[in-house]
Amino acid sequence: MSGITRRNFLKSSAAAAGTALAVNRLPRAHAKSAVTVAPAKLNQLRYGQVQLLDGPMLEQFERNHRFFLAMDEDGLLKPFRERAGLPAPGPVMGGWYNDSPDFDPGKNMTGYVPGHTFGQYVSGLARAYAITGDAATRDKVHRLVAGFAPAVTGKFYVDYPLPAYTFDKSSIGLLDAYAFAGDPIALRVLGHATDAVLPHLPAGAETRDQACARPHKNASYCWDETYTLPENFYIAYQRSSERRYRLLAERFLQDRDYFGPLARGENVLPGLHAYSHMNALASAMQAWYVDGSEMHRQAAENGFEFIRTTQSFATGGWGPDEGFRKPGSGDLGESLEKTHSSFETPCGAYGHFKVARYLMRASADSRYGDSMERILYNTILGAKPLLADGTSFYYSDYNNLASKFYHQDKWPCCSGTFPQITADYGISSYFQSQQGIYVNLYVPSTVSWVQQGARCSLTQRTEYPYRPETSLELKIDRPRAFAIYLRVPEWAGAGTRAAINGKVIEGTLTPGSFAPIERVWNDGDRVEFFIETPLHLQPVDTQHPGQVALLQGPLCLFAVNNLSEQVRTKDLLTARQVTAGASDWVTGAGRTLRSYPAIRDEKYRLYLPLAT
């Protein structure tokens, strides 16, 4: 470590930044003592209110937490210190993370975006601290912020191809360090980092074509993502009350080329970079939360619906070769033969969950929970773990001869979103309103909250979706009348039912809704929820009706043998689990199918050719 302390930073940060601090500076006056936001129907819980219990989600979260807690701090700070001309001890992490003369866009990505994921690693650790209360995690976050403070200057962004891209990630790390790990200087450092990057940003949001129209050294200068900046600028405004962040958020809203057309119902997605434009919808939702802009909310709703209905595979994943495709073109079906890069899994899952949470909070619409559920069980829970040298899982593969594989480059972008999405599992599982608690995901967990002055906790025990049921036990320190809302998926069968303390509830549980169970609740009450999970087929697109995926409920079933043989519809729709709760299914014709998280090194196929 450099030995630079927080106290030294507070005294010297302005001098360390040099003249860059005076360029493009916006007023830092506080807009008001409190920031108001648009009313949402549902409230997001705090990270510490949800504790995952034993299961694959907890295992994934804990693995990522241990991984980043063990990372070398000097190695993480090295690219910033080197570019600032400071002593830079520690290992060279390599891959995308450190400067390299070998960088050749499209041919050799070593040295692509130095330091780009630093803020995401800090964010993941800060969220992990909020969940676990682990002091070592908090202390590491504080040390990283203190080390980053003098190292991020305008020098860092000189000849840097993607300044908005990396600053955006740095900013969420600092914001989360402040909000979730109580770092006392993080907001000051954010102001310093903002001053450092502003001279290197354009006047407003640019498309990639617009960025390329300016003089540039190589193709990577065309790839910056200024259009994702507003989300974190709005968050900075809400957490600091500094008006300049709100002004910056408004400055980088991509209204003309993206949000305006989406709000009018124009599908402008085809041809765009998939993950960053899904992620940009989070900026539109923050514009609604902070500025009350109905146009931006409509843009986010329409954009998400276009992705969900015209761009997605049966898994919920989207963006083969990282691009949105033209609806009605048959491109999704053709991609099954052309690429193995079908869905940017940790990045896409993170953005998908985040935008779905924003939309669900605004609307209380269960469709967003259904969409999150598909992504969870068919993509991110099957991601291969990070390796110590930065080897990372990046793409899910839906090719007709598919496999799970690691990305060829060390420390790519998906190494940054992976710890963030796994830390967010808990806050994606439950929501709260004045009327009660909403159960969005059926995962082993305990949620704690206060309802009308009563302390409540709800413990969920389940092996869903391998067993289509969950049991929820309530602890409450005094009787209270409220509702427990259960998400009834839109695909749920007619046999779906719920019981309280063993007595089946009369009435209909409508698929595609949150079903309220309202009563005066007492300590020890139990809710049992059984979801009928019918088998169903989903073609890859309308141009390829003979290429179908088999699903049971939300779970895609991937063939792991006889991959090239045609299959009869009858055989698929009579498939059965090998044993109750198993991750394997078999058809009458002897084909074995397996869930994505259970696939290891075997070849597999998602879309099967129907016999004519």
Image (tube, rainbow, N blue to C red):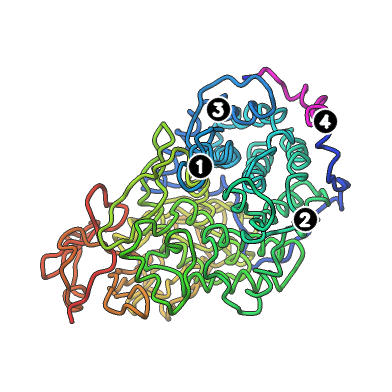
- Residue 357, image x, y percentages: 57, 61
The kind of secondary structure element at disc 1 is loop
Circle 2 residues within 10 Å: few <14, some 14–19, many ≥20: few
Q: Amino acid at mark 2?
A: Ala
Asked if the residues shown at circle 4 and circle 3 are in contact, with their CB atoms under 8 angstroms apart, the answer is: no
Indicate which disc, 2 or 1, sits on the residue closer to the N terminus.
Answer: 1
The residue that mark 4 highlights is 14
- Please name whichever residue, 58 or 5, is drawn nearer the observer in this view of the structure: 5
Say the numbered circle drawn on residue 136: 3
Q: Nearer the viewer, mark 4 or mark 3?
A: 4
Q: Amino acid at mark 1?
A: Asp
Circle 4 residues within 10 Å: few <14, some 14–19, many ≥20: some
Q: Relative to residue 439, is residue 245 drawn left or right?
A: right
Indicate which disc, 1 or 3, sits on the residue closer to the N terminus.
Answer: 1
Q: Relative to residue 454, is residue 17 drawn left or right?
A: right
Magenta highlight on residue 16: yes
User: Which quarter of the figure has residue 163?
Assistant: top right
Q: Quadrant of the C terminus?
A: bottom left
- Residue 180, image x, y percentages: 63, 41
Which span is picked out in magenta?
A: 2-18
